[in-house]
Amino acid sequence: MYYFPQDPPYFILIAGLLAGIACGAAFDGTLRQSVKAWSVDRRNTKLATSDGIALPLTFLGICLGIIFFLSAGLEIFGFPTWLAYSIALPLTIFIAILLWYQLQVVFKQLDRGGSPALDLDSWEE
């Protein structure tokens, strides 16, 4: 027995995609602004312990857009709504935690050693 939705959620798919792209552009701008402020005053500004809410908020917006995009895509391919969201939600949360952790690691490396700390060619032995 197959499940075919009568009205596939194309609107939710497009809205999730556009929300993810818009929040991604805002995340990019916020991240560039934070790095620019850090490069001007490295002693008083720490990237890893930034108190701003803009960066996590835009990251959360990206994640929400991805959740809706993935779940709508799964629904279009015949998954029931409850199953589509129960796949998209944990998958997005897991990947978001990994990405946020990696971003914090990069920020800590930059705080400790500046831009040369990210030079991967210097790790050659």
Image: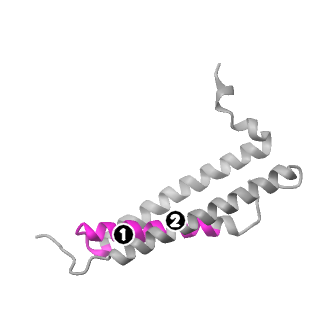
The residue under the point 84% across, 55% down is 45
Give SS at disc 2. Answer: helix
Q: Which residue is mark 1?
A: 71
Q: Which residue is mark 2?
A: 21
Residue nearest the observer in this picture, 81 or 9:
9
C-alpha gap between disc 1 and disc 2: 17 Å
Residue span colored magenta: 57-82
Amino acid type assigned to the residue bearing label 2 in the image: Ile
Asked if one can make out residue 90 in the rendered structure from this viewpoint, the answer is yes
Which quadrant would the N terminus be assigned to in this image? bottom left
Residue nearest the observer in this picture, 39 or 101:
39
The residue under the point 65% across, 27% down is 121
Asked if one can make out residue 46 in the rendered structure from this viewpoint, the answer is no
Q: Quadrant of residue 55?
A: bottom right
Residue 16, image x, y percentages: 44, 71
Image colouring: one colour
Residue 112, image x, y percentages: 79, 42
| First along the sequence among labels 1 and 2 | 2
Residue 8, image x, y percentages: 27, 76
The residue under the point 75% across, 44% down is 110
Residue 73 part of the magenta-drawn span: yes
